[in-house]
Amino acid sequence: MRREPANRISEKGLTVWRIHGIFYTLIVLVPAIAASVLAYIFEGPIWIYMVSGAAVLLAAYLLIFLFPKIRWQRWRYEVRETEIELQHGLFIVKRTLVPMVRVQHVDTSQGPILRKYGLSGITVSTAATNHEIPALMMDEADELRSRISVLARVAEDDV
Amino acid sequence: MSEKNRLHWVTAVIELLKTLKEAIIPLVVVVVANGIGRERSGNFWLDNLTLLIFGAFIIFTTVAGYIKWKRFVYWFEDGELRIEHGLFVKKKRYIPFERIQSVDYTEGVLHRPFGLVKVKIETAGNSSVLEGSEADLTAVTCEEADRVSAVISEAKRRRRTGAQEVPEGGGEGIGALPDEPEEEAKTLFRMGRKEIFLLATFSGRIGIIFSGIAIFLSQFSDILPYEAIYDEVVAFIRFGVFMVTAAVLALMLIGWVLSVAWTYLGFYGFTVSFDGDDLFISRGLLEKKRVTVPLKRIQAVRVSENPFQKMLGYVSVKVHSAGGNAKEGGAAIGLFPLVRKREVNGMLAELFPGIDTSAELNRIPERSRPFYYRLDFFWVLPLVAAAGYFLFPYGLLALLIIPVIILAGLWQHRSAGWAVTGRQLTVRWREFTLHTVYVFRKRVQSMQERQTIFQKRRNVATVTASFKSGVMPSKAPIRHIDEADADRLMDWYDPGSRMRETGAVGGTPASGGE
C-alpha cells in the first residue's frame, strides 16, 4: 500500500463511537431480555439465559471496545494541495483518493452526540460520490471545509 | 422578446389520455368493488354510483387537460427559455440556454397525424430529482420544434465562440472535440433488421410482458368466477399434464412473440448520427424518439458482450453521460444496442478521437484466483448445508452449486484485465456478461484502493474507479490485482504524485488542463 495519510481524527471521536456502540448493544440487549423473560415465564431451559447473556457480553465487547478502537486506529486523512486522501475500514482497508478539481462541495454536519463533544463530521462531494471524514474537532472541521473549498475552487472543469 | 407560444391543441388530448392511463387501475378497482354483483336498491344515484364517478372523473380530466393546455405558454427572452403554466398556482420556469443539455424529440402515435413532436428539454440539474430537471413541450409542430432547437443551439454556439480563449479541458475529455464549424449531422450507425430482430429475441423484455400479463390478470381476479374456473381447472388437469404443459408453453410463446414485436417496434430504424458537438440517437416505428447527447458530457464508454452475443460475433455499447433525468435512473444510454464486434472499434474511434480501444490488457495475477470464488462460499456454504440437512436426500444436490461457483470464479478471473494508456483507463471484468469500460482520468471522480486481511497476505488489492453516470455514480472494479500495480494505478490518478514525479524528472510540463 502507498504511504498512509498523515492525520488521525480526534480522540474524542473514539468516545463518540463507543457511545454509539452502547446504543447498538441496547439493540441486542432488548431481544436478549425478551428471550430471558419468556424463558422465565414458560420455564424454558437454562441455556437460553446463558446464550442471551453471552450474546450481550460479546456484542458489548465488540461494539463498545474492539470495533471502535480498530476503526479509530485505521481512520486517517490528509488534505493536500491537489487531492484529499482518506483511509478507513474495519476489516477491509479502504484508501480513497479525491482530486481537488473533482470536489463539488463540502458540508459539515453534526449530530447531538457529536455536538456535546465539540465534534463535527465533514462530507466531501464530487459529481458522483460522497466521502465523509467523521468526528473532527469543530474548529478543525470548519477550517478544513474552508480550505478544501478554496483549493477546490482553483480549477473548475466541466463534469 | 418573442411572442408567447402555445402548444398544439392535441396536448389537451394527450394530457387526458395520460391521466386516464395512470388512473385506469384505481378506476377498475372502484368499478369492481362497487358495481358488479350488487343488488339494485332502486335508488338511481346509488345504483349508478360507479358510472357517475366514472363520468365525473372523465369530465374533470378533460377540463383539466384543456386548462393545462390553455394556460401553458413558452417564449424566448434574455437568452432564456421561459415557461409559464398553472391555473391557480402560476408556475414559471426560466431556463438559461447555456444550462440546456439536450433537446430530445419524441413522436407518439397521436403526434404523427398532425406532424407534431414532443420536445423534451433537459438541463443538468441533479437537485431536482423530484421536480424533474427538464421542461416538456408536449406537442408542437415539427417546424416549431426545429425553431426551438435552432434558437437554443444558436445561442449556445454564440456563447461558445465568445469563450473560445478558454481551453476546453485540454482535449483530455472523452469526446472533447475540437470546435469545428457546424456541419451536417453524419450518420454513423444504422441498425439492420437482422440486428433488431436478434436484439428483440435476446432482450430482457419478455419478463416485462409476463409481469404485465400477471398484473392484468390480477386486476380482474375480482371479476373472475373463481369457483367455476376452479372446476374447469380440475377437469383440465385431469385432461392431462401434457395439455397443461402445452398451455404454459403456448403462453410463453405468446409472451415471447409480443416481446419480440415490442422491441422490434421500439428499435425500428435505430440510427446514431453526430455532428461536432452532439450525438443523436433516433429510433422507433410507432413512437419515434430522438435523443441528443452532448459529446462533451459523455463520461465513459462501456462495451458489453454476453456469451450469446459472443457466439454470434456481436457486442453492445453504452455511454455513460452526466446529467440526464432521474426517472430513467440516469443510467447508461444505449449507443449501439447490438453491433458487429469487428466494426465497433472503428466507430468508437470516429466518435471519440482520443479513445484507445486496442490497448494490451494486464491480466490478473495467478495467486488471486481463489479470491474470485472464495467470498461466495460465505453465503453459499451455509445455504448448501441447510438444504442438505433439511431436504435430506435431494437437498444434497445443492452441492453441485459449488463447482459451478468455482468455475464461474475462474472464468471471471481469466476474463478480467485492465490497462492504463496515457490518460485513459481501460477496465474489463465479467459478471456473466463481459464488460469493458473506457474512461479518461479526467472523468474519474474518485478512486479507491481496498484490501482485506486475506488480500494483504497475498499482496493483492482491489481498485475501484468511480465516474458519473446520470445522477448516480457508476463503478469500474479492478479486482485482486498486484498490490504494486494497485499503488501504481492510484499514483496514476493522484494529481499530487504526478506533480512530484514530473518535478523529479525535471522540465516535463505537467499534464495540461487538469
Image (cartoon, coloured by chain):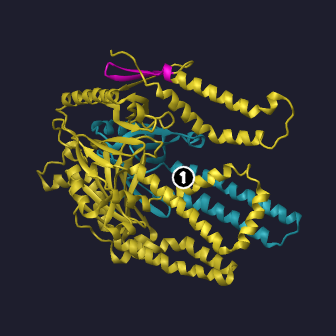
Chain colours: A cyan, B yellow
Q: Which quadrant of the figure contains the C terminus of chain A?
A: top left
Relative to B433, B358 lies left or right: left
Question: Which residue is outermost to the left?
Answer: B507
Which image quarter: residue B322? top left
Q: Position of residue B512 (x, y in %)?
A: 18, 45
Confirm whether residue B291 shows in the render: yes
Please say whether residue A157 is one of the residues in the magenta stretch: no
> Which residue is depicted at the point 69% across and 55% down?
A27
> Which residue is depicted at the point 39% across and 55% down?
B475
Q: Is residue A68 above or below residue B398?
A: above
Callout 1: chain = A
Magenta segment boundaries in residue numbering: B69-85
Q: Position of residue B30 (x, y in %)?
A: 72, 39
Relative to B357, A132 lies left or right: right
Q: Position of residue A100 (x, y in %)?
A: 32, 44
Confirm whether residue B495 shows in the render: no
Name the foreground residue: A153 vs A53: A153
Q: Which quadrant of the figure contains the N terminus of chain A?
A: bottom left
> Which residue is depicted at the point 83% across and 72% down?
A45
By secondary structure, the bulk of the magenta-drawn segment is best described as: strand
Q: Amino acid at mark 1?
A: Leu
Q: Position of residue B459 (x, y in %)?
A: 36, 72
Please say whether residue B77 is one of the residues in the magenta stretch: yes
Q: Which residue is mark 1?
A: A14
Name the foreground residue: B61 vs A104: B61
Relative to A107, A158 lies left or right: left
Name the foreground residue: B77 vs A88: B77
Q: Is residue B164 above or below residue A70?
A: above
> Which residue is depicted at the point 58% across and 55% down?
B211
Name the foreground residue: B108 vs A157: B108
Question: Which residue is outermost to the bottom?
Answer: B393
